[in-house]
Amino acid sequence: MYRAKRMHPAVILFQFFKSLREMIIPIVVAFFAFRDEHFMYFIGAITLVTVLLVTFSTITWLRFTYTVTDEELRIESGIFIKKKRYISKGRIQSIDLTANVLHRLLGLAKVQIETAGSGTSAEASLTAVKVAEAEQLRNLLKVTKVATSEVGETKTVQAPFYQITNKRLFIAGTTSGSIGVLLAFIAFALSELEQFIPDNYFDHTIQWIIGLSVVLIVIITIGFLFVLWLLGIVGTMVKYGHFRIERRDEELFITRGLLEKKQITIPLKRIQAIGMKESMIRQPFGYVSLFAEVAGGSLDKGEEYSTLLFPIMKKDEVEDFLRTLLPSYSYPIEPTWRKLPIKAKKFYMLRGVIPFILIAIPIAIFIPTFLWTVIVFLILGLYLGYLRYSDGGFLIQEKRLMIRCRTFSRITVVLFHKRIQAYEKKQHIAHRKQNLANFKLSIIGKYGSGKHYQLKEVKDVQADSLADWFSYRV
């Protein structure tokens, strides 16, 4: 008989704080509504809610059990409605371990089990188990291969790995471009908190800003941006600290995080494409980041759609990295691309300036004194359009396709023929007159949705030859 197990009792605490966090806004609103005459009612309500949450969390923990058999993982849960879930070992794609600060203090880990049909969340999640038990569970739920010698003795083989240095991690933080993200977050937070801030506060603040000199405003702005830049560096180092990737048999194992330690498992058979990203900040210094498009799995909160394989490395190190960990995706640093035709340039230049032309119209009407800024942006738009044109290209290598394109960052992607789910060719009237076409390739991305890569204004005959290659007609 297989013995059912429960998670660690700390799950009660995690569940309580999770429920409390979801109720924080109603609690704050109730505090301001009853803080004067009916404050005792507020205290009584908070006490009742606390008791109910603790009771609910405790019963939830007691009713959740899991059992590992030879063939499957069985999970039973539910307070009023009992749910039973059976996950076959053969369906399990990856088993990831995560440990935040509280987990690590208590010697615990969170186990997330993903299958091909997990959707936007993990197929099964064990919120808190002992680290040793989490490791044992991962080993029990997957078939492991043991290398043996001719005489039957076990071989110990050092798995190939790459690990980021603190210097490179600092460079990754300084060139991450996270200032824009932080500004957007601050703007969103201020918009949400606006209703709780008195109107006279805004009036006094505006009057204070008007009273400052231009030089002081510039100094304050630069100082504010500098603080955001430092926060971006700290955030990158905390998120990707101790980053290490290694290959064991047919899987990649990624470990990262200073405060929240995360272990990610990527089966090689789930990798749909490998990409190299060169941001505008990093490209002049020869630094890139590597990512993978992985089929299935879940999209965790705060994670990007693509799976990061390495935060930052020199471009001339990419070939050795891929040759060591993913040899089938290795490629020369500067392959011979099929470049875009010269008549495609005008389309790219036009698309680059259109957004700034739309911005220029209201500026010219309402604040014409700042029209010179639009001219600067128009020049930048033309330059961006030229970069998109000059960087665009593709290359067919037998059963493999490489695409290079740019939105803001330059992206180079390697895809195998068997991973491409669909090919689409598009032409409008202007394209047909110029013998040009757009093409788009689709692969399977996270939680089973599509991921698309496209290249615009290639030669019409090249788009047709690519369609023939996709259709096995060549």
Image (tube, rainbow, N blue to C red):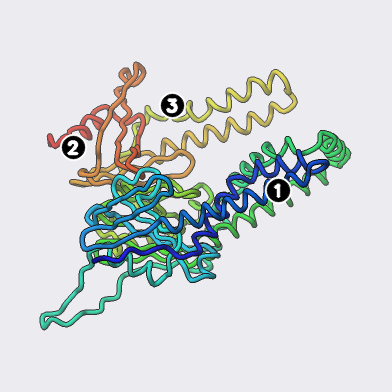
| Crowd around label 1: few <14 · some 14–19 · many ≥20 (10 Å) | few
Q: How many marks?
A: 3
Whichever of labels 1 and 3 marks the residue nearer the N terminus, that label is 1
- Which image quadrant: the C terminus? top left
Q: Which mark is residue 58?
A: none
Residue at the spot of label 2: 469
Between the C-alphas of marks 2 and 3, the distance is 28 Å
Give the farthest residue toward the left: 150
In the rendered image, the vertical position of residue 268 relative to residue 245, given as above or below: above
Instruction: Please state which of residues 140 and 207 is positioned toward the viewer in this rendering.
Output: 140
Element type at marker 3?
helix
Foreground label between 2 and 1: 1
Element type at marker 1?
helix
Q: Amino acid at mark 3?
A: Lys
Q: Position of residue 71 (x, y in %)?
A: 21, 59
Residue at the spot of label 1: 44
Instruction: Please state which of residues 341 and 291 is positioned toward the viewer in this rendering.
Output: 291
Residue occupying image coordinates x 55% and y 62%: 238
Residue occupying image coordinates x 60% and y 33%: 377
Q: Which corner quadrant of the image does residue 171 belong to?
A: bottom right
Q: Amino acid at mark 1?
A: Gly
Q: Amino acid at mark 2?
A: Trp
Whether residue 174 sits left or right of residue 99 in the image: it is: right
Whichever of labels 2 and 1 marks the residue nearer the N terminus, that label is 1
Residue at the spot of label 3: 346
Q: Position of residue 41 (x, y in %)?
A: 74, 44
Q: Position of residue 92 (x, y in %)?
A: 27, 54
Instruction: Please state which of residues 19 and 116 is positioned toward the viewer in this rendering.
Output: 19
Q: Which corner quadrant of the image does residue 462 belong to?
A: top left
